[in-house]
Image (tube, grey):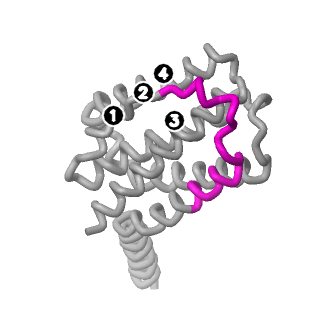
Amino acid sequence: MTTFCLLQISLVLLCTTKLSTLDCNILLLPHSKMIKGNLQLLDKMGQHFPQQCQNEKMHFKFPEQFLKSRQKEDAKVEIQEILQQIFYIFTKNLTLAAWDGRSLERFLNGLNQQIEHLEACLREKMENKNIYSRTRLKLKKYFQKIDNFLKDKQYSLCSWEIIRLEVRRCLQFIDKVIRRLRN
């Protein structure tokens, strides 16, 4: 009887492990849909780019080469880092951003779900953090420039609108990477 129970428990654990692995292997499809949803929410958060902000545009150089890896696991780590950094930026001082609060909340919730799902899938891979440290450092430097820009502009309405456009570009690039990895 005890052996039979242990066998059943082992089968359940094996199936659960296999299902969670499969979930991580097909990870790209739900994330592609979530990225598209987040792009829509970014558009809903604010209206058109304000006319008074036209002269304040700033171009940040997104480190695109880091998302060109052929390895799905590397790309997942990089995507997870980008989403974490975006989440961090959007939890800053938003008092001057004239955005729809409900859309912003849904945007942050969507980012958080994606981050948690990627973290769960990558937990084992992340034990060897040295592999990803150089990539993460470059991405963090990029987002540090964004953070510094917001601080320098004292989190003004225009600075937030510029960052909203930049984050839109980041998410569009992630969507391209996900589509490329799916093929």
Q: Which mark is residue 137?
A: none
Mark 4 or mark 3, earlier in chain? 3
Q: Which residue is mark 2?
A: 142
Residue 41 coordinates in the image, percent (x, y): 65, 55
CA distance for labels 3 and 2 = 10 Å
Q: What amino acid is labelled 1 in the image?
A: Pro
Mark 1 or mark 3, earlier in chain? 1
Local packing at callout 4 (Cα closer than 10 Å; few below 14, some 14-19, many 20+) is: few
The local secondary structure at tag 1 comes to loop
Residue placed most toward the observer, 12 or 81: 81
Mark 3 or mark 2, earlier in chain? 3
Q: Main secondary structure of the magenta part?
A: helix
Boundaries of the magenta span:
37-58
C-beta proximity under 8 Å, tags 1 and 2: yes
Q: Identify the residue at image location x=58%, y=33%.
A: 162
CA distance for labels 4 and 3 = 12 Å
CA distance for labels 1 and 2 = 7 Å
Q: Which residue is mark 1?
A: 63
Q: What amino acid is labelled 3 in the image?
A: Gln
Q: Identify the residue at image location x=25%, y=69%.
A: 183
Q: Which residue is mark 4?
A: 145
54 in the magenta segment: yes
Q: Which residue is mark 3?
A: 85
- Comparing labels 1 and 3, the label whose residue is closer to the camera: 1
Q: 52 left or right of 129?
A: right
Residue placed most toward the observer, 147 or 161: 161
CA distance for labels 4 and 2 = 5 Å
Residue 94 coordinates in the image, percent (x, y): 74, 31
Mark 1 or mark 2, earlier in chain? 1
Q: What amino acid is labelled 2 in the image?
A: Tyr
